[in-house]
Amino acid sequence: MFLSPSPVFVLGDWTGKDGWAKKIGKRRQVPACFTADLRQKTRDPSFEFVIVMSILVTGGAGYIGSSVVRALLTAGEAIVVVDDLSRGVRASGLSQVTFVTGNCGDQALVGSLLDQHGVTCIIHLAGSGVVFDSVNDPASCYASNTAATRSLVELAARRGVQHFVLCSSGAVYGDAGLGALPEDTTPQPISPYGRSMLMSEMILQDVAMAGDFRYVILRGFNAAGVDPESLGGGAHAHPSTLLTRAMSVALRKSPVLDVHSAPRHTPDGTPLRDYVHVADLARAHVAALRYLRAGGASRTFNCGTGRGHSVLDVVRAIETHSGAAVPVRRLAPRQGDPAALIADTTRIRKELGWTPVFDDLGTIVSQALTATYRQGPVQTMTPAIVRLVAESGVSAATLKTLIARFAPARRPEATTIAAPAAAAADAEDASPDARESQPTRKLTIGMATYDDYDGVYFTLQAIRLYHPEILPDVEFVIVDNNPAGLCGPALRQLADSIPDCRYLPQGHIKATTIKDWVFRRARGRFVLCIDCHILIAPGALKRLIDYFNAAPDTKDLLHGPLIFDGLDGYATHFKPEWNGGMYGTWGTDPAGAEPDLPPFEIPMQGMGLFACRRDAWAGFNPDFRGFGGEEGYIHEKFRQRGGKVLCLPFLRWMHRFNRPLGLPYPNVWADRVRNYLIGFREVGWDTQPVIDHFRTLLGEQVWASVSDAIGPSLLQPETSAGGARISAASSAEPVV
């Protein structure tokens, strides 16, 4: 039986026999099970000991395992990894842990590790995880998964391990329907792999019930993507996975992608899967460990995003992000392949406080492509180079020169590969010189959108219908944040049907920073940036153009009063105060009561509508992720650059806030908190109120998950050069 897990320090100089007391300066770290023996040997009650609560991670060098090890190290855990390296890679980062090459089913080996390192928890990830390998060789699958798990669970119960986390699979559900599957769905696996994992679950449940330890079973769905911080390098997913095979075709390493049809009807005839980012899956294992340590009962949790994507969805996403075509060959359904496998994640979100950070297929694809580019030969990357360079803002001529220089001399044909038409056009747009040479308009009206065709349609058409007097002076820009989504083709067609309207796909960015692209691609001297679900009062846009004509060199950021849905009130500004996870609450100044009143200064305002001179745009921090965090921060940046934040009473607007069908884009707490922390630091504001607000709002359990995702470096309060904290409201007093 292990002693209390509270930390105790060895202040003496006794190393203990066999060298298993680990030295830390003048202290010693020892396994918890040896502390009583040490006290008896030293006969000195003043001696204190560091109790090492080691975690044994099986398969810790694998695709998922290396990410789990990284997440555990970030959480400050002591880790022992056992991996036979049949599928994993012992990367340099694993030098930070105790690594043993061996089979987790070897009871003599594992037993010695449990004793030597005082292991209190096992996280079991080792085994065979490829469904179609199991169909061809079921005996090996049962040996790697079921037999090894039986051996490990038996040993854990016998040696007094307290907690056990099993990385299982959604494959245990079989072909259970097209909807999201809750944990109480009756498992009916249809492949040897699914059956081997279900047997492993049953062994763990039965042994735990008869013994004295608790477990969490994590049914992971389709792990995908690359964890850029994983200790294994994060890029060694199995070569048979869809993402790996499709990228191979996009990078010209394979000629065609074989796509098997679904065994029954799905929207496009191909299987639907729930792709969960490997880093999010790793965080779920840390959350499970914390849950057990806090006294949580044995429990099974699904781990996915709750969103299904078809095989063809993945193909389209890779084509969008790589700039290369992925030819597809349709084949018959495969044995063991369900039509759909999508997680209901209600339980894990509620009980573990876990939410996926990378809850977007485009992000998963773009990160995986980036990692592949870094590893592969440059001649396989031409479409990707074209796309990335085009988005960086060079001219078409420079782009051709770069391609020629990157192509190897012995492969002259590679220099003749033409840039995709869209990428070349984007390159021309992005170049400042080329932009100036294009037909210009006085005002660019731009919007970023994420799967909101209706919003874009009615916003644009309302402007054209109710503001016809401005049309000769304006251009429209639609920046699509999810061009691989269902709305992408329709948005492109809409832009093509409207004069002076451009459609700009930018699916590689999933963040507030997408609004920067409106300014980067604008051809007008002035820019009005709006959300894609905005209505603007008649006459307001003409008056805005007149305002810019009268102040052509303005450095100011311009807003207008938000009109409430009932047309019975308005908000001229945000008051700089925290509420409900957002910095800023609506405030009303009588100075904005009538459209003809003069402009006046405000502290900040909601970012659904704002305008400025294109070259005066202050820009968002490029490290922002996801959505949120711009209010207050961007306004302070304008002030620090010598501008003001003004409310123009005539610039009245309405905003659709209600989303009865839910948000189409990922909106997670970790991204929002991280953006606030980064933004506040950039402008020199105190970050402690950010931390205090979200800790109180989310509660300690959810906050622990969020803070894990953010990392420790951003959570240290920022101070000014003199050591005093800076108030976020110091530079702009709220208007009451």
Image (cartoon, rainbow, N blue to C red):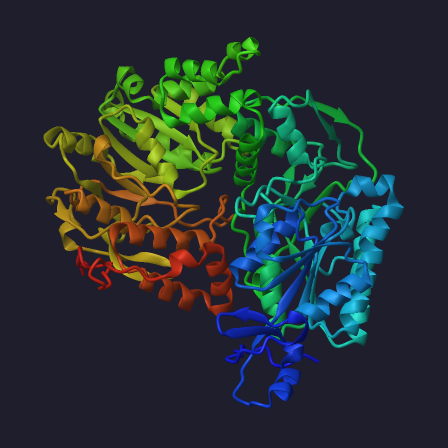
Where residue 99 sits, quadrant-wise, is: bottom right
Q: Does residue 205 show up?
A: no
Where residue 651 sits, quadrant-wise, is: top left
- Name the residue rendered at 13%, 51% in the picture: 591
Where residue 615 sits, quadrant-wise, is: top left
Tally of marks: 0
Up-down: is 268 above or below 2? above
Q: Nearer the viewer, residue 196 or 582?
A: 196
Up-down: is 660 above or below 362? below
Apparent side of residue 11 relative to residue 467 in the rendered image (left or right): right
- Name the residue rendered at 77%, 52% in the picture: 172
Q: Does residue 16 show up?
A: yes
Q: Nearer the viewer, residue 444 or 247?
A: 247
Q: Position of residue 381 (x, y in %)?
A: 54, 23
- Name the residue rendered at 80%, 29% in the picture: 332
- Name the residue rendered at 42%, 36% in the picture: 449
Q: Position of residue 91 (x, y in %)?
A: 61, 46
Up-down: is 128 above or below 390? below
Q: Nearer the viewer, residue 339 or 402?
A: 402
Apparent side of residue 414 relative to residue 698 in the rendered image (left or right): right
Quadrant of the drawing holding the C terminus: bottom left
Up-down: is 647 above or below 70? above
Apparent side of residue 617 relative to residue 193 in the rendered image (left or right): left
Q: Nearer the viewer, residue 47 or 381?
A: 47
Quadrant of the drawing holding the N terminus: bottom right
Q: Position of residue 479 (x, y in %)?
A: 40, 31
